[in-house]
Each structure stands twice: as structure tokens, then as C-alpha cells.
Image (cartoon, rainbow, N blue to C red):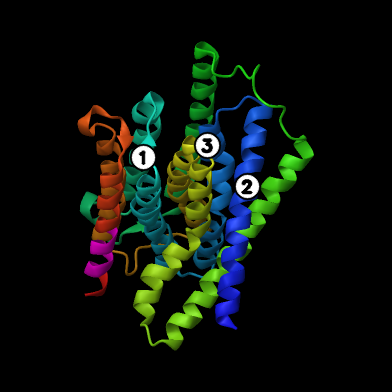
Amino acid sequence: MDILLLLVGLGLILAGANFLTDGSAAVAQRFRVPEFIIGLTIVAIGTSTPELVVSVLSAAAGNSDIAIGNVVGSNIFNVFVILGICALIRPLALTASNIRRDIPFGMAASLVLLAVTSDRFMGTGGTDKIGRLDGIVMLALYIGLMWFTIRATKRSGAETGTSDTKNAKKPAALWLSVVMIVGGLAGLVFGGEMFLKSATAIARSLGISESIIAITLVAGGTSLPELASSVVSLLKGKAEMALGNVIGSNIANILLILGVSATIHPLTMGGITLTDILMVVLSSLLLFVTAFTFRKKQIDRWEGAIFLAIYVAYIWYLIK
């Protein structure tokens, strides 16, 4: 039965990713919004729904380490696994705005996470935690960041003429696009939950330890929507949407999800260590570095392979 649910969940994920990508692309075309912005906002926030649900419910129940660990694990998975797989399929070209603005914003979000979880190191408290004030500030930063990014991207498109859709195909009806987006998100969320639960049950029946399940399946499971939507977007020739999804999800995970969670209930680090937080910072730093290797301004296949190797090494370090 678990194997059947696993396959059904996988089918829902793939179908949801396909509907979400097509619906989002249609909205972008209709309103002349760059696909990167759609990926950064609608797709990123939508595919981060599993992380939002898990972290908020965990915070409300007082399980702070799960709330923080879910976000930390998902962000590491997003860069090293999702972008690693996408780059192996097809090298990901980076635009000038990606390099100057979007990737540095993602790095800034990871540094904010490091700052708010280093109370003892910075001498601001005896316990490392994300307080309510930290959560409110993070939410304000997220709103300001999205407003600035959307405004800057629209201005850039207007100046360069990229918003001209004179020769573009007629977009789908707006109501149909909305239905596709909502239906796609529902498929991703419910399919991801079904896949995660069945995979966890199978792992337990095979005698795999709880710690390995938590480290791999929980973080990876809540990131399945991002993985599916990014790969499908890439295969449909919409690499900007795939990249925007990952960068936007990582920013939303830190500033929005942890911001909401900490506002509901202050979050203590628990079993989450400084090493885990530094891995989030490292992932955003390496993403920035890839933009300048060999002056290609893209994430190459060999860099994608390195990303995947780093993730495997990190998992090995955690369970050894």
C-alpha cells in the first residue's frame, strides 16, 4: 500500500509541477511580468507551502528545532540538490540582475539567519534563539525585498523593451491560468505530503534510523515541490523560472517562514548547530561564486556535480 501511495504522490507532484509552470507562464505573459519574478513570488511562495505548514505548526507546538531544522535543511537541499540536478540537465544561464541583485539578496538572507541565531557569539543573550522581534524584522525585510525586486525588474524590463509581447502567442484565459496555478500547487502540496509519508513508512519498515529519515526525507520531502517545479520549468525552456523558484524559496524560507514562526512563538536552536547554519551560508556563497567561474556567468554541469557531492558529504558528516 505504501508503494502505491508513493507512486500516486509522485504522479501528483509531476502533474502539479506541470500545471503550475504552464499557469504561471501564462500569467507572466498576460501581464508582461518577467518569468523570473513569477518564479520568485508565486511559484516560490507556493512551493514553500509545505515548509510553511511544517514550521508554523512546529513553532505553535513548541518544537522549535523542527521549525528551524526544516528551513535549514530545505535551503541546503534547494541549492545543492535542486540546482545541482538542474545544472546537470542543462547549464543554467545567469542574467546580470541575478548576479548583481537576486543572488546577493539570497546571500543576505542567509547572513540574517546566521545573525539572529548567534546570540551567544554576538553577546546578545545566553541562548541562541530567534525572538519575536527578530521575526517581525524578518517579515518586514521580506516585504521590502519583494517590493524592491519587483519594482526594479519591471523598470529594467521597461528600459530594455523586454516587456514587448507583440509577437508572443495569445495567453490562456486568466481564469484558466489561475485554476492551473491553484490546482498545480494543490497537487504539489498533497502529492508531496503523500510521497513523504509513504517514503517514511517504507524507510522505517526497512529499519532505517529516525535520524537519517529526519535529515534526508523530511527536509527533502518538503522540498519536492521546488524540485519538481524547477526541473519541469527547465525542461520547458524556462530556466529563469527554475532559478527564481530556488532563490525565492530560500529567501521565503528564512525571512517569511521563520519570520512568521518566530512571531507566533520564539524559536530556540535545540539540536540545530552552527555548522548547519554555516552550510546555508556556504550554499548561497557558492551560488554566487559560480557566476564568475571562467567568465561564463552560468551554473555549469560540473558545478552542478560539485553541488550534489557537497550535499552527499554533508549528509555523511551528519550521520557518521
Task: Classify 189 as above or below 210.
Answer: above
Check disc 2 and report its element: helix, strand or loop.
Answer: helix
| Residue 117 in which image quadrant | bottom left
Residue occupied by mark 3: 143
Report, in whole angstroms, how far the alpha carbon at label 2 lies from the one at label 1: 22 Å
Q: Residue 91 — which label?
A: 1
Is residue 89 rendered magenta in the image? no
| Relative height, residue 64 to residue 3 (above, below) | above
Q: Position of residue 105 (x, y in %)?
A: 38, 35
Between disc 1 and disc 3, whose residue precedes?
Answer: 1
Q: Quadrant of the C terminus?
A: bottom left
Is 316 inside the magenta-drawn segment?
yes
Choose the circle earlier in sequence order: 2 or 3. Answer: 2
Give the residues drawn in magenta, as a range: 311-317
Where residue 126 sits: x, y (%)? 27, 60
Question: In the image, is 19 to the left or to the right of 212?
Answer: right
Q: Amino acid at mark 3?
A: Ile
State how far apart marks 2 and 3 are (Cα).
Answer: 23 Å
- Residue 225 percent location from the top left of the image: 53, 56
Is 269 or 282 nearer to us in this picture?
282
Quarter of the view holding residue 288: top left
> Relative to the observer, which residue lies in front, 59 or 101?
101
What's under tag 1, amino acid-wise? Pro
Single out the mark in the foreground, 2 or 1.
Answer: 1
Q: Residues within 10 Å of mark 2 (few under 14, many from 20)?
A: many
Q: Residue at x 37, y 24 (%)?
A: 96
Q: Which mark is residue 20?
A: 2
Majority SS type along the magenta span: helix
- Please tell me how crowded label 1 is: few (under 14), some (14-19), or many (20+) other residues with Cα within 10 Å: many
